[in-house]
Image (cartoon, rainbow, N blue to C red):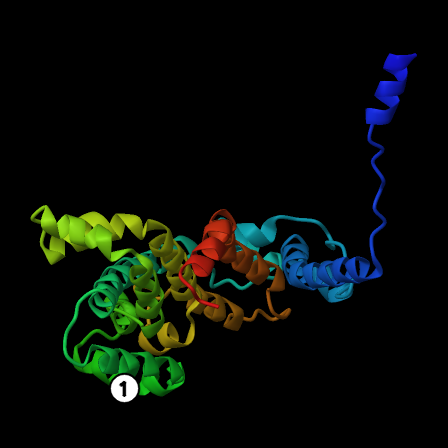
Amino acid sequence: MAAVATTTTTTTVRRVRRPSPGRIVAWAVMGVIVLVTLLPFYWILRTALSGNAGLNAHPTDPLPVDLTGNGFARALGLESAKEAIAQGGAGGGLKFWRYLLNSVIVSTLITVCQIFFSAMAAYAFARLRWRGRDKVFGLFLAGLMVPAIFTLLPNFVLIKQLGLVDTLLGIALPTMFMTPFAVFFLRQFFMNVPREVEEAALLDGAGKVRVFFRVLLPMASTPILTLAVLTYITSWNDYFWPLMVSYSDSSRVLTVALAVFRAQTPQSGVDWSGLMAATLIAALPMLVLFGFCARRIVSSISFTGIK
């Protein structure tokens, strides 16, 4: 009996906490935000899996109409011109793999070069002492307030004078070296690194260059990865500047190619199924990349002091 009493007194009864009205409202708002965010992606998938004839007949149907995968076949260039026209598509087709390769080359070139040069500039602004450093950084940071559209015409004139129009290098060059945001982002991290680490390396005989490459860069792997993902996604989604510079398939990136595919309107109307299929395929790599790195991006932004 004593054992039973002891067990009874030591047993803790877990009370189920009822959710407060504020928590219920917060979850409801979060659910609405998630629904609104995911609805466009669902509609793209629904349109890509539908036939063009069914879409024209039932444009507001929430489910795929005449379920088919021909839109993906046209986007990937797996259908002939006759088959594409029969399915309500354009006979011109889409050189998807060529445009995909161009986008990968441009985005990789911009990301690698911009991260490297921005890291060196951030190190100079954060760790080196030279006259007028803060004033130069403030002037450099003022570039964040200049709208990107103001730089399009000067950049185009420069690219034309260099003879790089309609080339992949001409698309990548304006943002290939550094940007104010990238320098500011990495500078915030370098400023948080204890100076004792750098001083210890200097006492061991390492120079400034060796400290940068052997000590600080490995420590900044997480912020660099975060900045690389953001830069890659931004360059991948860029549209207006590649549209101004590229005129042929040799330099046309995927975002511009989608607009060209949209302009190839057949007699029956726009090939919405093929266009949404190509859009979904083009966006899928960036969604997967961001999904894998989302947690590191959030932790890196909080660590570098961007609030």
Label 1 sits on residue: 154
Q: How many marks?
A: 1
Left or right: 20 as drawn, with respect to 70: right
Q: Which residue lies furthest to the front in this view?
A: 2
Q: Position of residue 238 (x, y in %)?
A: 41, 69
- Is residue 65 visible in the rendered image? The answer is yes
Image quadrant of residue 269?
Answer: bottom right
x 89%, y 15%: residue:
4
Image quadrant of residue 224?
Answer: bottom left
Left or right: 110 as drawn, with respect to 293: left
Camera-side residue of 76 and 131: 131
Q: Residue furthest right?
A: 1
- Is residue 286 visible in the rendered image? The answer is no
Left or right: 158 as drawn, with respect to 187: left
x 55%, y 56%: residue:
280
Q: Which residue lies furthest to the left in this view?
A: 205
- Residue type for callout 1: Pro
Image quadrant of residue 22?
Answer: bottom right
Camera-side residue of 225 and 236: 225
Camera-side residue of 34 and 261: 34
Count neighbours of disc 1 (C-alpha within 10 A) and say few if under 14, some if 14 to 19, many if 20 or more. Answer: few
Point out the image quarter for the N terminus: top right
Q: Where is residue 25 in the image (x, y as percent from the top left)?
A: 80, 62
Camera-side residue of 77 and 245: 245
Task: Provide the secondary structure element on which disc 1 rests.
Answer: helix
Q: Where is residue 209 in the image (x, y as percent from the top left)?
A: 12, 56
Left or right: 46 as drawn, with respect to 16: left
For residue 78, above or below residue 33: above
x 27%, y 48%: residue:
218
x 86%, y 26%: residue:
9
